[in-house]
Image (tube, rainbow, N blue to C red):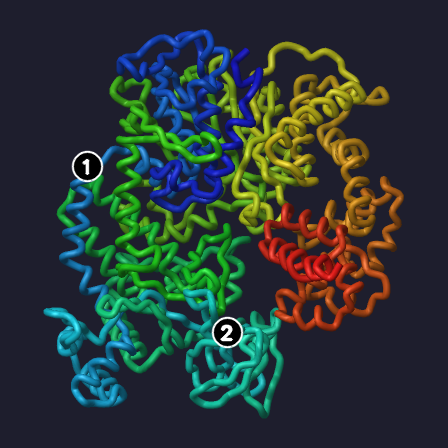
Amino acid sequence: MKPIEKDFPIEHVNEIAEREAHAKEKYRPVLFIHKWWARRLGSVFRTIVLYTLVDENTKVLDERTGKWRKITEEELENPWLLYLKDVDFGGKVVLDPMMGGGTTVVEALRTGCKVVAQDLNPVAWFLVKKIVEPVDIEALKKAFEMLENQIADEIKKYYKTICPHCLEEYAKIHNREPEDVLKEVIEELKVANDSREVYEQYWFEDKSKIDDKKNIFADTMYYFWIKQVPCLACGTKVPLFRGYMLARTRDKKGYHVICPDCGNIFIVSDYKEDAECPRCGKKFNPDKDGNVEGKYYICTNPDCGQKNVIVEAIQKTGKPEERLYAVEYYCPHCGRKDYKQADEVDFLLFEKAKEEFKEVEKEWLGRYIPDTEIPEGVKTKEMINYGYKYWKDMFNERQLLSLGKLLKEILELDVDENVRELLQTAFSDLLNYHNMLCEYHRLANKLRELFRQHAFHATANPVENNLWGTKYGMGSFISEITKISSAKTYNLSPFEKYIQNGKTQEKSMKMQIIGKLGNIFNDNNANAMITCGDSSYLDIPDKSVDAVITDPPYYGNVIYSELSEFYYAWLRLALKDKYEYFRSEHVPNATEIIVNKVQGKDEKDFIEGLTAVFKEAGRKLKDDGLMVFTFHHQEEKAWGAVLQSVLNAGFYISAIYPVQSEKSTSTHIFQKANVRYDMIVVCRKRKGKQEKRYWSQIEDEIYFKVQDEIKRLESRKKNLSQEDIFVITIGKCLELYSKYYPEVYRNGKRVSIDEALSSIREIVDSQLMHTRFNQVAAETDTLTAVYLFYMAGKTSISYDSLNKALKMRNIPMKEVLDSGLVEKEGSQLLILTPKERAKIIASKRELSAIDRVHYLYHLWKEGTIFKFGSSLSEDEKILWSSEPVIKTLEYLNEIEGDKTYEDLIKFLRDRWLKQKQLEV
């Protein structure tokens, strides 16, 4: 029995993993040279490798002597002692048949293993290849300098704007009006062959400093655009503003808002209050007076006012045009970083870039700019509905011109091919920050990249980034090169982070991540066999692999082929003549293991695909070897599909452990399901016939094992969610059921996988959660407990599943339906937001704790909580800030991770409760 089958250091790993989840790129920099989705945590996979492969032949580097020594008995008994030590497994072979972002590959190479890794996706194959291949860092930096000398200014010339402060200073020095200087600049730009000639004319001396020159032109950080859709009734172009707050001021004391009439940008103290434009006198509410309500837009023509559905209008009129309305800039001359209304210079520079692109478009299309269509898919559907047909449609002309120039220069650069490919990797990752689906985080004053979620979201308010980059801003080519240089340095000088006395520490390690690519079975120098293809067939000897360590697809949660198409379309421009994997027009998905309606793939296809890969992995695995994988899902059917695949492939589960996954507040994969744990699933090849077992016996084992697991986890993290406990319970069910499969019986009949899993929710509800539910109900009230256990953090819930859960607790479904917490839509219950519930709550006579919390949340978001407080008597304030209300806020903060709940708790305690205490 291997150490991982006996135990796994959950407490130690989770302590590190929880911090790594919030800063992955700082723990494993090399894994983040490029975007990949749902990449697993390095700390978790390092521990999996250690606990799976450690044996008496393991070598450990003695830090005092610098020499390798044999593993000690203590280390063999407790492999966690090896986590911060350099370990050499002497060339043991690790297989990852679904390598994705390459976490297994990196961790295996760091422990002296040889690796066989394959993925169907060409983008994944290329990225992992670049992650592990060594590179001359100095040669990479030199290549960047060559690029900078040859193309940087050509790109940067289109990312300039007038600094209002320096313009005013220039005008004052020359006894002119700023408006006159601006008009002069515009006329000169119109006739200039190269805008840089104009920039050079506007240098001036800062008389307050010796030998200090300034210029009226600043660097643009971001351009703000708004989509405009024609009214279907009158044809008026309607800008799709949901509100007119542009950004918070950097001192956090106010907000930049946009006048809906004249476009002026000015500062207000509270954007939720009515404002008046100082330029044109327009009175408006920046928060409420937008032109968009949900899926509708409202015509701004005062003689029309027609309400239309946005998507329907776009499908009739085509992809919306976009209008530039604001700029965020950094001026290197006066040091200001600020926002301004877009002016004629900004419009003119864009038009000049547009004209230049039109001149080269025909020649560049298919060479430096992708000409492929966006394929129909689950994730691409929204883009197609919004009028995007080709991948190039996601970019404006200035972006296409700049990206085309940069890629052309990279391909023509006289450098080593390995260096060129890393530059191409930096270029590809750059695309995430340079497209017209990027948005702006208005309260944090920063860009929000395309893949902030595992989806394509066609924003109405796109933000254009400065491609080459300036001193501030994120996602520029400069920062990509810096990131990739730092990441590749990690290959040669790796480190490990750990927690000591509550603080994160860093320890240098010696084992380097150097992938020598080749066939490890006939090339003694090779240590990494990285291939691209369908892993139901692996061209390696049978029983040649010591361990299979992988991370299979998450059922239908992350559709890698559709998401990676975005990068593939650009990468194949450079790689299609070099690698056969990039010759196809699209990412191959015929054998992708996924549940995808558009591809016509259901649960049966998922099981068949995963079974085929697991079977092939089993053929390549030595008889005493383990297959270890991680999985993460809240749905019973997804777990059932995975278990079926494991069993069909001839394995059983010998152990299973819960470990920290992505950030607990992440909505990427689980759409607010709040599952915080991956399950590490340890499998062995099945041998011989199983002994007969009754389900009632397994049920008892599940209950006691889960109780132990929960106690272990809650020793560190309190208040495990319903989903956390459900997933942990599913894990123990799979482990015990699989050991006796198919000889598991109930009432004389064999228990199927589906029957076993359907019993799990009952175990969770009737046994594990019973005491917890009663405790929460006692602290708050029954209705609030129902909301916290079954609805919090979700947008909908199945009527049948909630009804079943409520029956176990003798709570009438009618009570929930009448509460105004949900609305029934077919077989689903839509969970209403605090804003949607506000009017319902205001009309109720008796309020539950969740009613009061939702109403307070709504008031806080609307900025009217002070007004509401002034209308309450002191006794009423006590009711609204009672212990059940505070408790509910605390639970919701834990479940949803929304800072508003923290703010409300502080407000109620500091204002309403403290005021009463002082009076007493």
Place of residue 188 in the rendered image (x, y in percent of width and height, measured from the top left):
18, 83
Residue toward you, 112 or 394? 112
Crowding at dot 2, Cα within 10 Å, few <14 / some 14-19 / many 20+, comes out as: some
Would you say residue 241 is visible in this rendering?
no
**74 sits left or right of 695 in the view:** left
Type of amino acid at the residue the image marks with label 1 = Asp
Residue highlighted by disc 1: 136
Q: Tell me if label 1 and label 2 are in contact, CB under 8 Å.
A: no
Seen in the picture, residue 389 relative to 555 is either above or below; the reply is: below
Looking at the image, which residue is at 25% across and 33% down?
134
Q: Quadrant of the N terminus?
A: top right
Place of residue 431 in the rendered image (x, y in percent of width and height, measured from the top left):
35, 55
Would you say residue 850 is visible in this rendering?
yes
Place of residue 845 in the rendered image (x, y in percent of width and height, measured from the top left):
86, 65
Mark 1 or mark 2, whichever is nearer to me: 2
Report how far apart the C-alphas of labels 1 and 2 lie in the structure.
52 Å
Place of residue 146 in the rendered image (x, y in percent of width and height, measured from the top left):
14, 52
